[in-house]
Image (tube, rainbow, N blue to C red):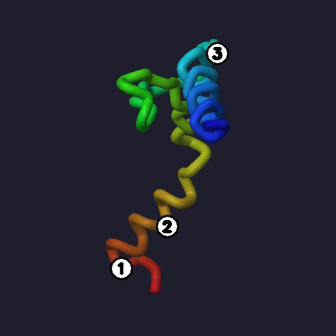
Amino acid sequence: MNAERALIEQQTVRAERRREDGVEYKLRVIHGSGGKLELVEEPPRNQHWFHEWARIMYLTGGLF
């Protein structure tokens, strides 16, 4: 019963998260919550430019 209560409390906290200015979010349904939504931060695209570049180079044969 404690595990179930902890799960409900965690879902409530996730569902009540507030949006911060300047951060992009997407909505996602919290699994097992009966349809409650949570905000999920979208990482800025420019942080992962190297990974994207390496992926493109690999797919085009530019590396390896």
The type of residue carrying mark 3 is Glu
Q: Where is 18 relative to 6, above or below?
A: above
Label 2: element kind: helix
Image height of 46 relative to 6, above or below: below
Residue 33: image quadrant is: top left
Q: Which mark's residue is nearer the viewer, 3 or 1?
A: 3
Label located before the other in sequence (2 or 1): 2
User: Which of pointers 3 and 1 lies earlier in the amino acid sequence?
Assistant: 3
Residue displayed at 52% across by 34% down: 42
Query: Vertically, is 8 above or below 31?
Result: above
Name the kind of residue labelled 2 in the image. Ala
Residue at (49%, 25%) from the top-left corner? 38
Kindly identify which residue carries mark 3.
20
Q: CA distance from mark 2 to mark 1?
A: 10 Å
Q: Residues within 10 Å of mark 1 (few under 14, many from 20)?
A: few
Q: Nearer the viewer, residue 12 or 20?
A: 12
**60 on left or right of 53:** left
In the picture of the structure, the residue carrying the numbered disc 2 is: 54
Q: Amino acid at mark 1?
A: Gly
Where is mark 1, residue-wise?
61
Name the image quarter holding residue 62.
bottom left
Q: Position of residue 29 (x, y in %)?
A: 39, 30
In this picture, residue 1 sits left or right of residue 35? right
- Residue at horizontal 43 percent and vertical 66 percent from the top: 55
Q: Which x, y percent locates residue 34?
A: 37, 26
Direction from residue 20 to residue 40 in the image, left or right: left
Question: Quick one: SS at disc 1?
Answer: loop
Residue 35 placed where, x, y %? Answer: 36, 24
Q: Residue furthest front?
A: 1
Kind of element beneath mark 3: loop
